[in-house]
Amino acid sequence: MNQTMALDLMRSAFMNTIKVSMPILIIAMVVGLIISILQATTQVQEQTLTFVPKMIAVLFSLILFGSFMMNTLVAFMRQSFDVIQRL
């Protein structure tokens, strides 16, 4: 394995990590922003209020995007095994 192949595999791993984690992170961020706006407008400053809606949103996003995430990771692993097999 030369340096180019290793760097290409590493770049592909980072890009797949970003692609797989981005939907859940965006949904959690949007839910957190909405809850923060609601807390600021109602002046309810309960710290634990943000956790339950975020957990529910992340759970639903895992159900919704789970097959996409699994297919992306399986495709990456197949690509990695193909690179290993060519060595």
Image: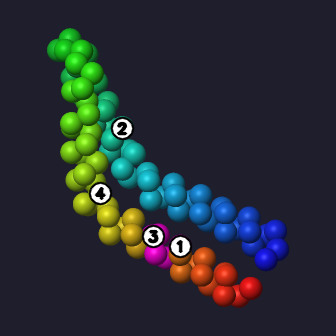
Give the mark nearer the N terminus: 1 vs 4: 4
Q: Which label's residue is closer to the chain start, 2 or 4?
A: 2
Separation of residues labelled 2 and 4 (CA atoms): 15 Å
In this view, the residue in front, 81 or 26, is 81
Q: Residue furthest right?
A: 2
Which x, y percent locates residue 18? 51, 54
Disc 1: CA contacts within 10 A as few (<14), some (14-19) or many (>=20): some
Q: Which residues are magenta?
A: 72-76
Q: Are marks 3 and 1 in contact (CB under 8 Å)?
A: yes
State the CA–CA distance, disc 1 to disc 4: 19 Å
Under mark 2, the amino acid is Met
Point out the tag, 3 or 2, that comes first from the N-terminus: 2
Residue holding disc 3 = 72
Q: Residue furthest bottom?
A: 86
Q: Quote the CA–CA distance across marks 3 and 2.
A: 22 Å
Give the foreground label among 2 and 4: 4
- Residue underneath mark 1: 76
Q: Amino acid at mark 3?
A: Thr
Cα–Cα span, label 3 and label 1 = 6 Å
Q: Earlier in the sequence, mark 3 or mark 4?
A: 4
Q: x%, y% of residue 58? A: 28, 48
Vertical side of 64 occupied by 71: above or below: below
Residue identifier under label 4: 62
Residue drawn at x 33%, y 41% is 28
